[in-house]
Image (spheres, rainbow, N blue to C red):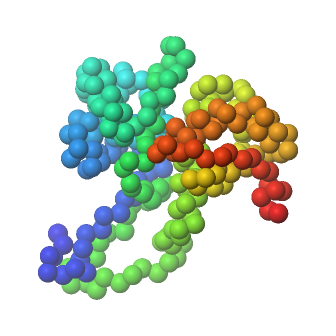
Amino acid sequence: MPDPANPAEEQDTSYVIPARLDGFTPVVDEVVRDLGTTAAIVYGVVLRHSFMYHQQCEASQATMAALTGLADRTIRKWLKALEDEKYIRAIATPQGRPTVYVPTDKVKFEFNITAGRSRTPAPRSGVKNQAPALDAKTPAPRSDKETKKTQLSVTWNNVLVELYMANRTTYTLWLSGSELLQCTAERATIRVRDDTAVEMCANRLRTPITRTLAGVVGDGWAGVVEFVTDEEETE
């Protein structure tokens, strides 16, 4: 237990989780405080499946009920509450398939994903708390550029999820390997694979892409979407 009189012994609050969350459901404190423990458990199931399956939860309500021991109606109640409070977004799917749920960025946290390596224990009382050397086992802190790239990647992945649900064949053909390079209040730049994809996206797909991106970004985003290739990006 950390000694209050010794700030150097402040408890380590970073998270290290396995690359797959089999058998483990996170419970987020913020959701507990806002909606209660049951809602936080349901939110944790959505997070768990999102971490394992490309930032989206495709688990059925029956699966969520089986994992948590909650009734189906309780799962439905708290999924609706989480959606109303903007913790998750529900994406409609073709009839007969479970609704897909995507966590929003309302909860701010960062996980250090490992392949099962346990966290280095906190120093014992009386041992000087020195900063660890940045070796192969201790990743360097993320730069602002790396953090921004991660945020763009998550945003674009959420856009692709919705576009693929609408027409998987079309968007897989033209947006496979695409990347959101920047997204400001005025402009979003999307890299696609070649000039043909640029032409197709600009002339045929710009409107649905813009609409979907605006829905994911929120806050009334109304920027202009442009498409570039690797060659144009490096010019």
Residue 143 seen in render: yes
Q: Residue at x 56, y 53 (%)?
A: 185
Percent of width and height locating residue 127: 26, 84
Percent of width and height locating residue 130: 35, 84
Percent of width and height locating residue 156: 59, 45
Q: How many marks?
A: 0
Looking at the picture, tell me which residue is in the foreground, 129 or 177: 177
Looking at the picture, tell me which residue is in the foreground, 73 or 51: 73
Residue 172 seen in render: no
The residue lying furthest to the top in this view is 96
On the rendered structure, is 129 left or right of 180? left
On the rendered structure, is 100 left or right of 186? left
Question: The C terminus is located in which quarter?
Answer: bottom right
Q: Residue at x 37, y 23 (%)?
A: 61
Residue 175 location, quadrant: top right
Q: Residue at x 53, y 70 (%)?
A: 143
Q: Residue at x 27, y 44 (%)?
A: 31
Percent of width and height locating residue 58: 48, 29
Question: The N terminus is located in which quarter?
Answer: bottom left
In the rendered image of this protein, does residue 166 appear above or below residue 53? above
